[in-house]
Amino acid sequence: MKKGIYRYTYLVLIISCSSFAFYIYNKGKNTVQLPQLKDRNAELSLAADWPIVQKTTAQLLTEIKKKPGQNKFYLALAKEYLQEGRVSGNFSYYNEACLELIDHVLKKEPKNLDALCLKGTVLMSQHRFEECKQLMEGVALENSYNAYVFGLLTDANLELGNYSEAILMADKMVGLRPDLRSYSRISYLRELHGDVPGAIEAIQLAITAGYPGGEETEWARMVLAHLYENSGDLVRAEEQYRMALEERPNYPFALSGLGKIAKANGILNQAIQYQLDAIKIMADASFFEELVELYGLNQQLDTMNEYAQLTINSLKKDNDIAYKDQKMGHFSDRELAKLYLSIKDFKNALEYSKRDYERRPMNIESCELLAWSYYNLGQLSELKPLIEKAMRTNYKNPEFLARIGIMQKAIGNQSLGLELIKSAFAKKPYLDTELEAVIWML
């Protein structure tokens, strides 16, 4: 009798322990290790929004711990981290953090619109353009009146070179919600199709629609400054950069922009200092690209190579991770190719240009970059089809036109090549020195 009771008690104990173990295991599966807010560097920590970001993030982390079943707090935290990635430049960490939070929500609510849109935004940030396009096409089938969905489809198609589709998506977006984000996309589409006055008009509407000093507003102002630069109007470009610094002190892209103005005016030491100041705030690859070029122009070749290698190593690490892990890293093939071109490592430039082209063979800038890499290696037989694809939108960026013109002359189209080069100089008399040197050698 006692043996039977013992067996029964033992069996109940085993079942209870197993049930408890299953509960603990299942609970662990359904919780997420909450990613924390990273400290900003000294300069960025002085920004007016930093105390607000810290307070908001702390509140959201507390709410999630109190109410782990409420998905809205996970998504609110993901939005905070997404914006912090833009502000700090620490995209790798915050993109991964966002995906952890978003995927946690999508496991419970596979059709949660906010979560899907946030995931699409992270995919764009990681340069996973095709993945974003496929995801958002599915979302659009059930959410045909959401402007953000069509904004992401505009971006993905733009990067992939599906320009007709991008125009359709942008038209839907601006029809649903004419605001800073939609006007910004209209501006870029107009620029890509050679309508620079129309691009300026649209980005001015975007700035007016935005909140002064907001990161998105001041980024739109950077676009306006860039358009003025490429139209040869340095005075207006500089005005926009300085205005951005008034509205958003120490905005690194505005500092970098002033460096470009100084470079155009031949004040190289000042240009270098502006880029160094920008890098202190945010280690963006574009600032390093500018700095590498400036050190080359200033004949500081050892420093140029040092910064180039430092940037290449950093980008390659993230790039390699992106190829191995779908949730991590950041595709940087284009940035790597441009850096290798700047230090005249044309073999590696070609390798990374090919990688970028393989991922988006219809993108005009990808076609031009690959063609330019072939040109620098003397492989002229590869140029014609790439140049034809690159020219199909009537893009009028001066450096772009100059490189295309140089390559047209190289394959025997002398008059067309000369016309494009003249057009580039007419738009921007202070072309990059490296390009000017190539042109004068023709």
Image (cartoon, rainbow, N blue to C red):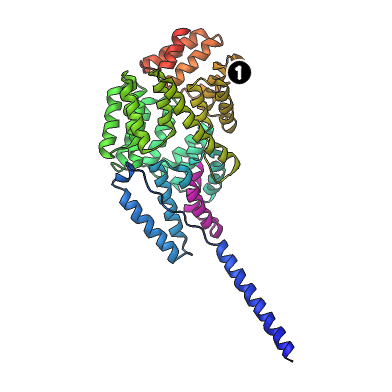
Q: What range of the chain is rendered magenta?
A: 95-123
Residue 180 in which image quadrant: top left
Q: Residue at x 30, y 27 (%)?
A: 237
The quadrant of the rendering that contains the N terminus is: bottom right
Q: Residue at x 38, y 55 (%)?
A: 57
Image coordinates for residue 264, horizontal then vertical, percent:
34, 20
In the rendered image, the residue lying farthest to the front is 302
Instruction: State whether residue 219 appears in this view.
Output: no
Image coordinates for residue 140, horizontal then vertical, percent:
52, 47
Image coordinates for residue 81, horizontal then vertical, percent:
42, 49
97 part of magenta stretch: yes
Please tell me how crowded label 1 is: few (under 14), some (14-19), or many (20+) other residues with Cα within 10 Å.
Answer: some
In the rendered image, the residue lying farthest to the left is 246
Q: Main secondary structure of the magenta part?
A: helix
Residue for badge 1: 382
Disc 1 secondary structure class: helix
Q: Residue at x 49, y 25 (%)?
A: 393
Which is more toward the observer, 162 or 40? Answer: 40
Kind of residue sitting beneath label 1: Glu
Q: Is residue 153 above or below residue 338?
A: below
Residue 235 in which image quadrant: top left
431 part of magenta stretch: no
Image coordinates for residue 275, horizontal then vertical, percent:
36, 29
Which is more toward the observer, 140 or 232? Answer: 232
Instruction: State whether residue 403 appears in this view.
Output: yes
Q: Is residue 56 above or below residue 240?
A: below
